[in-house]
Image (tube, rainbow, N blue to C red):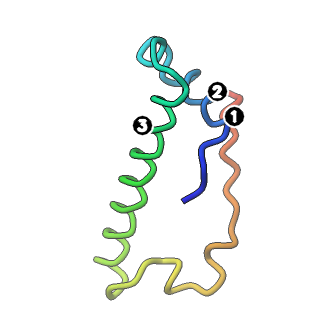
């Protein structure tokens, strides 16, 4: 699992607004790590349920090399 960068924290604060206004960077990092773990786990479980017990990355060679531009500057 990749680490949470300062840019990730900035984006999260922009998106979540007042909800996390009082949180420290460490608190926000911890919650982001938990959310990322949960979403990746749920997605892996779902993929295994539809792809014969394998994730999409396991089914498609090189799948982990794709980069998705998550530019949220337009928010």
Which quadrant does the N terminus fall into? Answer: bottom right
Q: Residue 59 placed where, x, y %?
A: 50, 86
Total marks shown come to 3
Horizontal side of residue 34 vs 62, given as left or right: left
Label 3 Cα neighbours within 10 Å, binned few <14 / some 14-19 / many ≥20: few
Q: Is residue 72 above or below residue 38?
A: above
Residue at (68% x, 33% y) in the render: 6
Residue at (36% x, 62% y) in the render: 41
| Cβ atoms at labels 1 and 2 below 8 Å apart | yes
Q: Nearer the viewer, residue 26 or 52?
A: 26
Question: Which is more foreground, mark 3 or mark 2?
Answer: 3
| Cβ atoms at labels 3 and 1 below 8 Å apart | no
> Could you give the CA–CA distance between mark 3 and mark 2, rounded to whole angstroms?
14 Å
Q: Which of the numbered marks, if any, corresponds to residue 31? A: 3
Q: Residue 57 placed where, x, y %?
A: 53, 78
Horizontal side of residue 15 vs 47, given as left or right: right
Name which of mark 3 and mark 1 comes first in the sequence.
Answer: 1
Label 2 Cα neighbours within 10 Å, binned few <14 / some 14-19 / many ≥20: few
Q: Which residue is mark 2?
A: 10
Q: Which residue is mark 1?
A: 7
Q: Residue 58 placed where, x, y %?
A: 50, 84
């Amino acid at each position: 699992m990749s680490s949470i960068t300062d840019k990730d924290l900035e984006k999260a604060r922009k998106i979540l607004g007042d909800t996390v206004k009082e949180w420290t960077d460490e608190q926000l990092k911890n919650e982001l790590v938990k959310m990322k773990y949960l979403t990746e786990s749920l997605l892996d479980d779902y993929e295994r349920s539809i792809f014969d017990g394998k994730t999409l990355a396991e089914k498609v060679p090189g799948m982990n090399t794709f980069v998705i531009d998550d530019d949220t500057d337009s928010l």
